[in-house]
Image: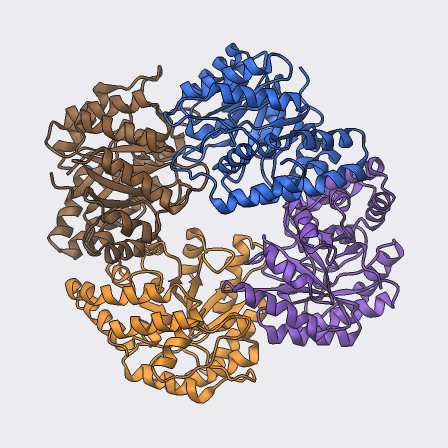
Chain colours: A purple, B orange, C blue, D brown
Amino acid sequence: MSFHGVFPYLVSPMRGDGSVDAAMLGRLCGHLIEAGVHGLTPLGSTGEFAYLDRAQRRRIVEVAVQAAAGRVPVVAGVAATTVAEAVAQARDWAAIGADGILAILEAYFPIAEDGVVGYFEAIARAAPDRTVVLYTNPQFQRSDLSLPAIVRLSRVKNIRFIKDAGTNTGRLLSILNAAEGRLGVFAASAHVPATVMLLGGAGWMAGPACVVPRQSVALYDACVARDWDRAMALQRPLWAMNQAFAKWNLAACIKGALRLQGFDCGAPLPPQAPLPDAGIAEVRAALVAVGAL
Amino acid sequence: MSFHGVFPYLVSPMRGDGSVDAAMLGRLCGHLIEAGVHGLTPLGSTGEFAYLDRAQRRRIVEVAVQAAAGRVPVVAGVAATTVAEAVAQARDWAAIGADGILAILEAYFPIAEDGVVGYFEAIARAAPDRTVVLYTNPQFQRSDLSLPAIVRLSRVKNIRFIKDAGTNTGRLLSILNAAEGRLGVFAASAHVPATVMLLGGAGWMAGPACVVPRQSVALYDACVARDWDRAMALQRPLWAMNQAFAKWNLAACIKGALRLQGFDCGAPLPPQAPLPDAGIAEVRAALVAVGAL
Amino acid sequence: MSFHGVFPYLVSPMRGDGSVDAAMLGRLCGHLIEAGVHGLTPLGSTGEFAYLDRAQRRRIVEVAVQAAAGRVPVVAGVAATTVAEAVAQARDWAAIGADGILAILEAYFPIAEDGVVGYFEAIARAAPDRTVVLYTNPQFQRSDLSLPAIVRLSRVKNIRFIKDAGTNTGRLLSILNAAEGRLGVFAASAHVPATVMLLGGAGWMAGPACVVPRQSVALYDACVARDWDRAMALQRPLWAMNQAFAKWNLAACIKGALRLQGFDCGAPLPPQAPLPDAGIAEVRAALVAVGAL
Amino acid sequence: MSFHGVFPYLVSPMRGDGSVDAAMLGRLCGHLIEAGVHGLTPLGSTGEFAYLDRAQRRRIVEVAVQAAAGRVPVVAGVAATTVAEAVAQARDWAAIGADGILAILEAYFPIAEDGVVGYFEAIARAAPDRTVVLYTNPQFQRSDLSLPAIVRLSRVKNIRFIKDAGTNTGRLLSILNAAEGRLGVFAASAHVPATVMLLGGAGWMAGPACVVPRQSVALYDACVARDWDRAMALQRPLWAMNQAFAKWNLAACIKGALRLQGFDCGAPLPPQAPLPDAGIAEVRAALVAVGAL
């Protein structure tokens, strides 16, 4: 399956008793696919992976795979502090039928570069017939993948993409230059997607795409058509919305926005707070401004 | 049980198959108690709590409680990103017989102060007849407890201590001043214990105390006797050792040092690296210099 | 005079006795103008403004203005910790004949937002018939201009541009959106110029343009022609060169590269070190790769 | 002259026209010496060195030296980005009669360790018969002096002290251990003075000592007498005052406090703001609490 285009980071709809709201998650997946998105990404930051235990994570991958039903690829997040736990998750998600693995390293103590590289290699070996997307996020993680580490990992056969969740857009061109075609790059919500597409990006993985799937696909299509003026005309209002969202806890914000659109996915798990009234008002205005409400 | 004095942060001895080496942990606990330490602290940073699943953590608390056999208090680490998981751990450790809870908040997204306070209050309610020690570590955690949050928490009946793992020693006097006697303060290995005792501290919780228990107790006794000249004479070489240790991954370093003393506790869990040869040589020299080898 | 296109940040050629090498600076300015650059920027970071006293800075502005001789605009850096010193420099540079002021706030203690805004307003008032370019650099300065502060300043008549020296390219679109046409944006060497031009940028101010003026102008022309495929073809090798430069002290690197091109501008002022041999080799290779040597 | 005890960091009293208020500075120096302080330190952070030009700095050193009249040593701040400027200041202050030099490195670009060491060595050579006090402040400066750099500098004959303005008190013991008696350590206002004296400190250099000179000297005397219980009884309220001060711009706060005590030293130089009303109220309460108003 080709990996390109708009991959919404799915929220994780949870009930008050800690169980996954599978019906709501399935409904959301179906809605996004009908809106034209090119893939689904459960268990990213927006999906609160850091707040879920293994059973909860497993259930979310199951539901997303079933809902996608082969129509679009599902790239499921693997996140752990130990190699052993990461390998177990990767095997499990592959067995469930995920098409790709979004590989995330959580750390408490700093890890030397060989350890970092070994962690991602172990995930790739654990799911040898799945595409691995490296994930790097300098803001919420203890360490950023260095360029030399990325180049080493780009030589692993099934590591084929990187999702960079930083704000340094120039670094994406550095990665593309350094990996010499062996790695595709997905943008995050902290980058302007049109600029990343100009640099040669494959698409973007982002929480806000959950609430503006059609608008995101239109922007992607303009970029692929290399109609950059149209792309920028679509990009400007989407970026304004993105900025409005960036003030709030990511999961709380997307869950709050989805509720306004008729998808009640519950609140983020405590001690995270739900979106406050001021946030709801701001998110509502942002959605209206882009025609998503 | 009175909480004061030297509480070594226990390493977590693990076998290659991921199981806890209960025999070795029990032997280490016995050795430390015979050396005079005043308490045991499993599942601190040194204990690699961030790398262990619930079953592994549970086993470690069980073994420490059995080994202590009521001779000294056991303060077991509770660490989670969600309130639900923290409450479950706290209930479990209390049921096993831990005398106190070291309460640690892990975070991925920033948490608002009310959420932070609510998290620690929930732990205190979950183990109402156990003493709770707040843990704050600006270096390895996303957020530091603010002084106003500490004051709010000091009013909870069974929250009676705080362990500050930062390097800002003046902050400890600020906490003591602000909590007006309601919170005792334990130092961490990043503070000079003698200075914290001068400020009115209750003792220290630190990984290096695993390998210099007798020397640590002698220093504590000098401080309690207010013989500050003797305290500083004992403190200087211990601090030099502490500095030598601080260059390395904490768990790797203490496990490496314990192996030199005859306690083979295995390696830290991958992708953490074991202590390299240069580290072994430096740690050996540091132990010899303080008479611990 | 219109402000747009490629503005090289000039190095400050200094003799060993601390005097400005006016002949060399004049020759460099002439060379760059003949190569097609659209403006000159003395006393930016590359120009070591932070290492020069008022008399040295004054001399550099004089020489640049004389060398430009009205062919391209000269935007001279004003940098100070106090309003009084900034105002004196701005008046002085305007009297000498600089066409614009690059306004830089140096800080030791954090400054409240009203103080920051007042500082830039005072510069604008001190040179009322000159165009002011705000400068913000989160990497080397204590504070970044906030978006609300930028919007306030965009309402000052002769504040017409901002040069953002951070790496967060998305922020440039946020600034353009927020200032609603009242501020043009210049990119820095930490941004990929083609992406900033796509977002609607006015051009770029950058030290490396000193050594690749023709290549930079060709890239600018492709962007203005909206021939984005050609732009990216020109951009990729220039970015690789930029990355090679980014490893080294900026002034040392550009001075070292210029020496290879026949412009001996001396060493950066001590305690800055000149470009080491490894740097010279790397810079030479980078220049050869883009046809600049 | 022996360097030990309480050295207030002097504020720089300025008139609205930018001239030094020599009469007020002289009166303040006399008042402090009569209160028993052991030295005077013009042109530290509190003295706004970063906001003053050479002529203003020169005048302040002159007035302080005249006012001290040999009764206590004057340690004057030398602060620059270049070796040349630092050397010129050091020679000038020595010629005026300063007893010591507080050596401060300002930086814009990061400086390699050899450059840092060379900078301080050049100052020491420029004032060979004056005592040099190294200054390091991780909070307001781009770089902190590393322990190896400090050890190298401790071997220079007239570099005899270090003033560490960080918050990491344990680092002071590391410095004392590493310099093996060749360097004395002065604490800053971010450390609890009693703890630094316990570690073997020589005294402290701090802005707040301007407003509590007698209380500071009493604390120093208790430490020297090794009466640590009395020292802590004096220390606790002084630390509470120190904390109240730490919320505000340092120069604004000390100038505001001095005005309440009858020393009108003007406002800090714009764009710094004067102490706001809330700050005046808090500072007044803090002074009353320690008997300084």
Q: As displayed, is residue D83 above or below residue D178?
A: above
Query: In the image, residue B30 lies at what x, y percent?
Result: 35, 86
Q: Nearer the viewer, residue C288 or C232?
A: C288
Query: For the point 23% across and 24% down, which residue is it?
Result: D25
Query: In the image, residue B161 lies at what x, y percent?
Result: 37, 65
Any part of residue A25 in sight: yes
Query: For the point 13% across and 55% down, which residue is it?
Result: D227
Quadrant of the drawing holding the C terminus of chain D = top left
Left/right placement of residue D278 relative to residue C154 reads left
Query: In the image, residue A231 lies at what x, y percent?
Result: 82, 39
Left/right placement of residue A143 relative to residue A244 reads left
Q: Nearer the viewer, residue C124 or C33?
A: C33
Q: Nearer the viewer, residue B208 or A12?
A: B208
Left/right placement of residue D74 relative to residue C255 reads left
Query: For the point 83% across and 42% down, which residue is it?
Result: A291
Query: In the image, residue A220 lies at what x, y percent?
Result: 83, 47
Q: Quadrant of residue B217?
A: bottom left
Left/right placement of residue A10 relative to residue D228 reads right
Any part of residue D268 in sight: no
Q: As displayed, is residue C1 above or below residue A63?
A: above
Q: Nearer the viewer, residue A177 or A14?
A: A177
